[in-house]
Image (cartoon, rainbow, N blue to C red):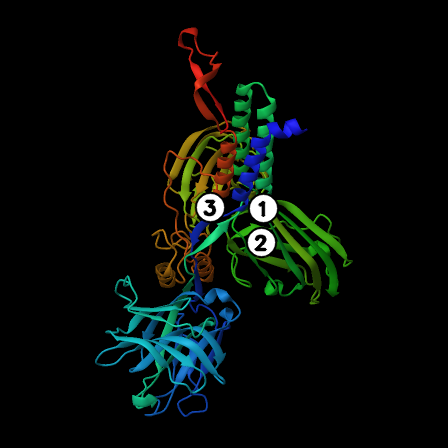
Amino acid sequence: MCYLIYKLRRGISVVAISMPFLLWSTQVASAETILVDDFDGDLSEWTLFDTTVGQDWGPAITEINGKDELWLASRRPIPAKKMGLVGGVWDAGISDSTYTNGTYRARVRIEGENTRAGISMRVTGALATGFNTYNFEVQPSRLSGRIVIARLEGLGAVDSVLASESIPLDEEIFLQASAIGDQLAFKVWSADETEPAEPQLTWTDSEYPTGTLGLYAYRESGQGGGFVLGGEVSAVFDDLTFTTPTSTARIIPEPATALVLVVAIAFAFVLRQLSRHRSFRTSLAVVSLCLLFNLNARQAASQVSLNLGSFNVSSTDPNAVPKPLQIPAGKYNAYSVTLDFSSVQGDPWSEEAIWAIADGAVGGVHTTVYNDPGTSDSARRDGLPVTLHWSGMLDLPITGATDLSFVPFQTVEFNGVTFVANWANTLLELSYVQPPALPTLTAHLGVVSDPFVPFTIDSFGSEFDTEIAIYSETGKVIRHNDDANGIEQSEIDVYNGLPPGDYVAALAGFNSIFEDDYAVISGTSGGGYNVSLTGHAISGILPADATAFFGFSIAEVTLPGDYNNDGTVDLADYTVWRNNLGANSGTLLNDPTPGVIGTAQYATWKSNFGATLPPPASPSIATVPEPSTSILLTLFALGISYRCHGARRCLTSRFLPANSRRSVHCCKFA
């Protein structure tokens, strides 16, 4: 045993040296831009304050206007030397230290003459007891504007101006404040100008270390803090974002991967010491490296489990309780749903309990249905309690981070009696499994459309009575047509388009039956055909009792929410979305959501705000392992490396021709 330990001493040393590197972390820079609010909804995340309440010129207007902007304004002109302060504190940041250090940006339009407006960081307290906060404020005037960093200290206090500078101010401007540690900075620029590289104001102050975000507007003050000018308060806020400071993050290897590699290193050294054939040892090392690389390169299948809880479903109002689904990024093509069914009112049958996964807002119109499986196999024709279960392939695969709805239905209303059922412990599971094998394709038509853009496929001009079907990549029949407009040829109008992915169109003769998994019972007619799909056309001869399959694709969205296609999801994309509200599906670039342009596209933009396209990879590089994998493989390679000794030769290459044999340096681990 002692001899073995002695022989393995170098291996044990390398493993011991490797462990700190495996457990240590790689330092990388990271920053995140978070959308605080663009006011395309309600003000539930804000606590608003208003000093005009109870005054003749109050209460103030604190509402979202028709442009999805927050409008803060006094109801009427405020008399001279009277005060009118209106604003809000962002509740979501009160208990989240994320918003203590970083950069806070807003777009502001000052509409009231002599109105001052600003954004606040590290806000604590309330209006009744007084705020402690750093205010970053703009003060327009007829002669020259001024920007200010100030510290507000409690109830009734006047801002302590920390730094100020006179600059011209336009009506619509961007404000950018930052508070990182004790360093404060303020940058202001016109909406139609380029953002300046450096802030106009900086200051060092450590009075307030924590707090949330805020915004406000009020009348200009006179000398000594008295409000001397009359008029209305009016300012509009929009596009509030917060960017965390660039920081370091640790990338720690997955424990299982690290353990496997340590064992592999130890095993390699055991073989190295015990094996007398160095060529075998080298081969083993290469094979081990390949196996480890392949193991780390494999992608785990997407899988998510969503507990939808318990809820009642009524036969008269099935859309009352759809459940929003926040589906994480991934690709899913299989589903499983389980729930406990019981009667609440009337005599609902579990056979009449059905559901769908669809796009669209809760209670809204669903333009794309991703799954509609029908009745559960375990359902009953009575109102007795039963556990229902559905499983199978989705009608359409779900790709990416998608906001969908689980839409439950309790069908049948008998003699005006409303039936109500309880669906308890409702569990939806989505996963990815190997899809059915594709049929032999007659041709592939390439990319025929962008996501959710309407298109048509037809067989007009064919010599025989045709039928057409469209299969999704899960092998499900999602569209079918026999005779179009009373003629023997077929046409399918996909009015709302399709999600990104690969599809198959099937062409067969009269009286064909299209089944899932690309199974077709073909009709008896055949002959010359013409198939046209959105500018892509193909012709040929189809024998009787045969089926022709044509592949086609719907383009993948490169960067969801990048509506101006500039490689970044930012405020410019929000403007594009806002300018196209109500337009038809497919109007926006990089829009993975179906339906009329509205809240679904906004949700896509919001969830991807700050995302950018990665730089294009070098064409000579096929795959780059993740950082942790690179570290592990590098350490393993070190474990089997050699130190070459030029004076000693120990191996002759016997696999070369005799006249070209050469000696190879013998190498051993240093």
Residue 458 in view, yes or no:
no
Tell me if 60 is positioned left or right of 285 in this view. left
For the point 64% across and 65% down, the residue is 316
Q: Position of residue 481 (x, y in %)?
A: 52, 43
Residue annotated with mark 1: 394
Which quarter of the picture shows residue 156? bottom left
Residue assigned mark 3: 500
Q: Residues within 10 Å of mark 2 (few under 14, many from 20)?
A: many
Kind of element beneath mark 3: loop
- Is the C-beta separation of discs 1 and 2 under 8 Å? yes
- Residue 346: quadrant of the picture: bottom right
Q: Could you tell me if residue 306 is visible in this image?
A: yes
Q: Nearer the viewer, residue 388 or 546?
A: 388
Q: Is residue 310 left or right of residue 496?
A: right
For the residues marked 3 and 2, what is the alpha-carbon distance in whole angstroms? 17 Å
What kind of residue is marked 1?
Answer: Leu
Decide which of tag 3 and tag 1 comes sooner along the chain: 1
Q: Earlier in the sequence, mark 3 or mark 2?
A: 2
Residue at 44% over, 62% down: 34
Provide residue 440's location: percent of width, then percent of height. 51, 30
